[in-house]
Amino acid sequence: MSTEEGSKGLVELFVWPWLVRVTGGLALAAILALTAYICHDTQENESSEEDHFSGIERPLPTEYRPTVLKLVNGCPKYGYIDQNNKIRIEAQFDKAYSFDCVRECDTEKAIYIAIVRNSKHWTLINSEGKSQAPAIFTWMSRFSDGLAAAQQVDQGKYGYIDEQGRKQIEFNYEFAFEFSEGLAAVLLPGEEAKWGYIDTTGRLVIQPVFDEAFSFRNGYAVVKIGARFGWIDRDGRFIGNPRYDQIYTDHPDIFFGGPMTVKLNGKWGYLEREGRWIAEPQFESALPFSDGLALVGNEDRVGYINLEGTYEIPPVYCDGLSFSEGIAPVIADCDSMTIGFINKQGEWVAEPQYDQINVFASHYRMRPVRIGAYWGFADETGNPVIQPQYEYAERFIHHLAYVVRSGSEAGYIDEQGQWIRSIEIVNDQNSRICPLKIAGDASHPLQW
């Protein structure tokens, strides 16, 4: 992956890594949740004695979920709650990620670590919420193969640390990504900085000859030389020669049997890993296959093709998104721009009625939808089950969803719409004000 602004290609990193924006007529929708702002909180966390003496088995830290528990001048403060909505770690972080098991995962000595941020710096905590690392970093990746990529605060170089925050691979790189299948892409310094791959000992195993490099998946990785993309095996040998304009890299099924979404001579098509075209490059825009169908577009209309490369659903829609669990959101009327849901036969399962949807919830049973000024929730068929009544709503995670009921009241509801927990709202004249982001760009209902 290049660090240059103009060479981001399809992937927009560090925001939502699993979503990709494709050039052309398709506009992928996304409504951001709370933005992580720079705020300060010094609240200490004490472990609860109740867990040790109640006779109830303490949940594993991997069952804890990072949750906004407090808003200080609109700035979210994260803590951790368990599956029973019990607070395990009090609100004290500006940003927090889930716990990962990093060592001895199949034993009673398993080590669980989470990455958290306060102000501009990241560090590690244990399952009690205590700092696990003496050092702080300006950026960190998730742990993989017992290591996490990190960026030094002072020099700005990248290297790798263990669960104690101790240096394991020297901070010698201009950029570094987390390990995948035992290898990690790193950007080496120099006037003509190039990407290569190292193993978990820090040994350079694939020479730095690439202008962009992506993580390995199922034994293959997409790379870029000059202006062209191809893919290599673990020995660094090209399996797909670098001849493509772009390759849709950020999709979980790439190199796992599904066709690749590639761009050649300005048009998108679908290619098997071995090089056979399923659909020759002919589309102005395209998304990867999902549920056996792929969204493609030409001349401001989109439709869906099958694995034979022929249209299963004709291109009659103004916009749309991929199928998930048998349904897909589409816009049929280019004037009203309202969203409905169709099945794989192109039949409406939910008539066009929504002004906006939260596409992050595309793989979840209940997804946030907006009608007019208010958000509610739709079921797996796309029909409303919790009527629009919230100024903002996020997807359900572990049966809870974050909502803003009014400009000054935020909290969590369950799948029946019952109010479960309010978020403490604090006004502090000595802290920075962070306006609460409760709406996305409404100019296009399927636009980032």
Image (cartoon, rainbow, N blue to C red):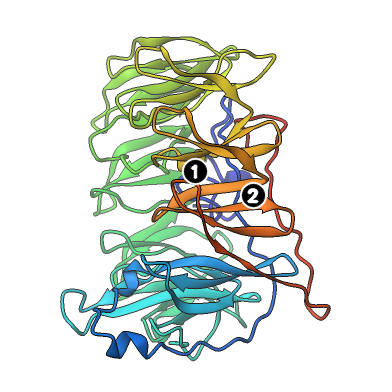
> Type of residue at label 2?
Glu
Count of residue discs = 2
How many C-alpha atoms fall within 10 Å of the one at disc 1: few (<14), some, or many (≥20)?
A: some
The residue lying at 41 percent from left, 42 percent from top is 249
Residue 263 location in percent, x, y? 46, 28
Q: Is residue 265 something that shows in the picture?
A: no
Residue 126 location in percent, x, y? 40, 83
The residue lying at 64 percent from left, 47 percent from top is 392
Q: Is residue 124 left or right of residue 144?
A: right
> Type of residue at label 1?
Phe
- Position of the C terminus, as image quadrant, is top right
Q: Is residue 363 left or right of residue 285?
A: left
Nearest to viewer (mark 2 / mark 1): 1
**Marks 2,1: beta carbons within 8 A:** no
- The tag on residue 360 is 1
Is 39 or 296 nearer to us in this picture?
39
Residue 44 location in percent, x, y? 55, 89
Q: Is residue 235 left or right of residue 398?
A: left
How many C-alpha atoms fall within 10 Å of the one at disc 2: few (<14), some, or many (≥20)?
A: few
Marks 2 and 1, the one that precedes in the sequence = 2
State the SS at label 1: helix
Q: Which residue is mark 2?
A: 5
Q: State the separation of the CA atoms marked 2 and 1.
A: 25 Å
Residue 3 location in percent, x, y? 58, 56
State the SS at label 2: helix
Position of 392 relative to 313 (above/below): below
- The tag on residue 426 is none
